[in-house]
Image: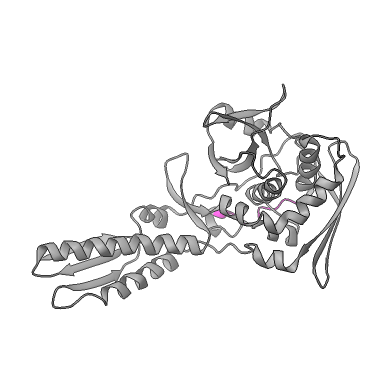
Amino acid sequence: MFRKITSPPLSAINRVLLVGLYWLSVGLFFSTTAGAEQLKFKKAQSESGVLFSYEWLDMDSTRQSISFELPHTAIKAAPTQQANYRPKIAQRYVTVALMEEAKKINPKEARVKIIPKRDSIDIQVKGANEDKVEAILSNLKAVQREAYNAYLDEHYFTRFTTLFNQKAIKPDHTRYAAESVKPLVAASQAFYEKVNAQSDSRAYFSLILSWLQSIPYDTLEDRVVSNGSGYAPPINVLMQNVGDCDSKAVLASSMVRAFLPSTKMIMVFLPNHALLGIALPPMVDDRTIVHDGETYVLYDPTGPALIPFGQVSEDTERYIVTGRYQVEAVD
């Protein structure tokens, strides 16, 4: 019996290879709101870590300043690189795994060929026993899926279905957020200590939002072309003093999670933007969305527009009202 299957590393990846990646947060939703202004940024190395110092103007045009040190051990523990997603490299990774598995098969029972093609991988199995051929083919398909999953996990990617029902790959934003919480505790603590002890959580959000919005915005590259090189993990945003909307959203998630360890949080993805939501009691004028029965107050750390906690830009509002957004829970 001869069985042949032509498939990419994963059934859905064929569309990813042919269509390309659908990357979020390509653009910035600019607003007529006053722009944030970073007045000073300084980064200095010490024996124990890296000292960050900032000065900026907040929502009320008041000069703010803050300093914090991230230990070298914390920086080393945090994910600091986002590899570009390259379909050919992913395909090669899966092909190697399939070939290694094929070597384990007794040639007297079946002959196996693994043939990588431009946008797919051919798996050919020949043998006299039909049941044995089917079993081998089924196992190879399982190895193919597992190898592709391992490649994504190793490089901090995750599958994603866009609003247009396209199968795609993107950085695993919520994983980056979760793994950056502990390394960023010192930064989050510095903002907590700066806020008046009698203030509520909104004072913390107002301070940290104005700081994040003042960090220079840079798209870095068009992600549709660059396959993810525009995304910067939280530590990289601080080290480079630049970030786009999804990069700043993940940084904000990590720092807020250290401040509110058990409060439910979400990332909200629009077709070309990203912002955040948190399950705090909303005020009358707050912009909120309901997800899985929970009400989340929205906030946008992107900048340069100084958008207060609980408010969003006009463009974002249009997407929210028409339901053109997707949600991921932040652990």
Q: In terms of image quadrants, where is residue 119?
A: bottom left
Q: Position of residue 33 (x, y in %)?
A: 77, 34
Can residue 222 be found in the magenta stretch? yes
Can residue 225 be found in the magenta stretch? no
- Taking the view exactly as shown, the residue that stands out farthest to the right is 63
> Does residue 120 appear anywhere in the picture?
no
- Taking the view exactly as shown, the residue that stands out farthest to the left is 128
Q: Main secondary structure of the magenta part?
A: loop
Q: Nearer the viewer, residue 48 or 125?
A: 48
> Does residue 181 appear anywhere in the picture?
yes
Specify start and end residues of the magenta stretch as a single range: 216-223
Please say which color scheme the image uses: one colour
Q: Residue at x 9, y 67 (%)?
A: 129
Q: Nearer the viewer, residue 147 or 6?
A: 147
Instruction: Please determine whether, in this image, residue 4 is positioned above or below residue 181.
Output: below
Q: Residue at x 72, y 24 (%)?
A: 283
Q: Position of residue 280 (x, y in %)?
A: 68, 32
Q: Residue at x 16, y 73 (%)?
A: 110
Q: Position of residue 145 (x, y in %)?
A: 35, 59
Q: Nearer the viewer, residue 151 or 21?
A: 151
- Taking the view exactly as shown, the residue that stands out farthest to the top is 284
Instruction: Please determine whether, in this image, residue 319 is positioned above or below residue 27.
Output: above
Q: Residue at x 12, y 70 (%)?
A: 127
Asked whether, in this view, residue 255 is left or right of residue 104, the answer is right
